[in-house]
Structure formats: C-alpha cells, structure tokens
Image: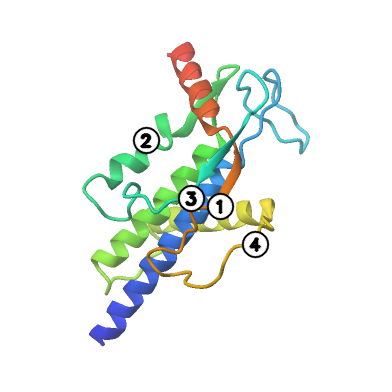
C-alpha cells in the first residue's frame, strides 16, 4: 500500500512538473495586443490589453531552472510574482484579469495542489472544497488554452520524465512577455 502511494505521488509530481514546464511556455506565448483600449463589447469579440504597441518577439531558451519548483522555501513567493497584483489590470475603471496572468495563477493553483497531494498522499483532492474547485477550474482552463493554441512543434519524446529532458539547443520564439509586465505595472501606477 505504501509503495502505491509513493509511486502515485511520484507520478503526480512528474506529470505536474512536465505540465508546468509546458504551460509556462504556453502562457508566455499567448499574449496579444491591439492599439488602444476599447469599451466593453456585447459581441463575442475578445478584448485585449493595450501594451503600448505591437508585441516584439523574443527567444525563450528552455532550461531546467532551480526556480519555480513545486515545493521549496522560495516556491510560493516566486510563483506569486508571476501574476503581480493577482493579475488584475484596470481598463476604463473596470478590473480585468489578464489572460497570461490568469494562466500563471492557474499554474500556481495546480502546483499547490500537487504539493499538497505530495505532503499528504492519503488525502485525495476534494473538488467540493473551494481549493479543489479552483484546481478543477484551472486544470480545465489550462487544457482549453493548450487546445486553443494547438502547438504543432515536434518535441523529442524520449526521456520525457527524466531530469534532463529539455534540449537546450532549441529555443522557442515567443511574444515579449516583459512588455506585458511593464504595461501592467504602468497600469497599476496609473490607477493607484
């Protein structure tokens, strides 16, 4: 029985780490910009946060970093910084959650669920609790965002759960997420 709990915890951690790595790339590549803020629309047209110009492209070098761990003394603080001010920006006096920050917050919710499951492996996640319902929402939201982007890039499938599975010679071309963070900071200063 103990071996099965340990094995299940290991697979939860491994799957969670792989999910987190892929979703960080997804989150950084999903930001879009338009010029100017628009009034709320009743149509199904999506709204985008004005970052002050077109998004530049940057290279994201894949790495097995010591940061953004599932469970370390610094983990909570590092993950919290990925969605400053809980990801909220204000447009025309109305608060909004930026999509990239929503995704980062959801990654953190999934991370915390994995961490808590690892700490108490005999206690299943209860989706009827607020934390369980939030984890369920986030898992579905991230699944839908991954499907929405439908990344067709070929990735090596050998050694997917090994420690050194990331190939450092292959970079991702992403939208410049630092511009989003800068625009969100400017928005905070303008509305505080």
Check disc 2 and report the residue beneath it.
81
Q: Is residue 56 left or right of residue 127?
A: right
In the displayed structure, 55 sits above or below 80; it is above
The label on residue 154 is 4
Q: Is residue 99 left or right of residue 150?
A: left
Q: In this figure, which colouring scheme has been used for the structure?
A: rainbow
Name which of mark 3 and mark 1 comes first in the sequence: 3
Please identify, in this view, whether the residue under mark 4 or under mark 2 is nearer the observer. 4
Front position in the image: 140 or 59: 59
Q: Quadrant of the C terminus?
A: top left
How far apart are the two marked residues, 3 and 2, measured between alpha carbons? 20 Å
x 31%, y 66%: residue = 117
Look at the numbered discs 1 and 4 and tell me whether their residues touch, using CB distance below 8 Å.
Answer: no
Q: Residue 55 in the image: x percent, y percent? A: 64, 28
Please identify, in this view, whether the residue under mark 1 or under mark 2 is nearer the observer. 1
The label on residue 62 is 3
Name which of mark 1 and mark 4 comes first in the sequence: 4
Front position in the image: 177 or 92: 177
The label on residue 170 is 1
Look at the numbered discs 3 and 1 and tell me whether their residues touch, using CB distance below 8 Å.
Answer: yes
Q: Secondary structure at mark 2?
A: helix
């Amino acid at each position: 029985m103990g071996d099965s709990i340990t094995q299940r915890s290991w697979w939860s951690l491994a799957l969670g780490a792989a999910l987190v790595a892929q979703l960080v790339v997804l989150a950084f590549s999903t930001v879009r910009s338009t010029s100017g803020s628009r009034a709320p629309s009743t149509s199904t047209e999506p709204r985008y946060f004005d970052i002050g110009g077109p998004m530049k492209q940057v290279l994201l070098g894949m790495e097995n970093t010591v940061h953004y761990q599932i469970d370390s003394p610094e983990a909570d603080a590092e993950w919290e910084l990925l969605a400053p001010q809980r990801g909220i920006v204000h447009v025309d006096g109305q608060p909004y959650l930026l999509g990239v920050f929503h995704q980062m917050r959801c990654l953190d919710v999934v991370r915390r669920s994995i961490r808590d499951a690892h700490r108490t492996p005999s206690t299943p996640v209860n989706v009827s609790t607020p934390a369980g319902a939030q984890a369920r929402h986030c898992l579905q939201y991230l699944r839908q965002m991954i499907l929405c982007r439908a990344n067709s890039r070929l990735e090596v499938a050998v050694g997917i759960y090994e420690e050194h599975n990331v190939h450092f010679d292959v970079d991702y071309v992403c939208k410049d997420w630092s511009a989003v963070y800068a625009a969100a900071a400017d928005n905070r200063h303008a509305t505080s």
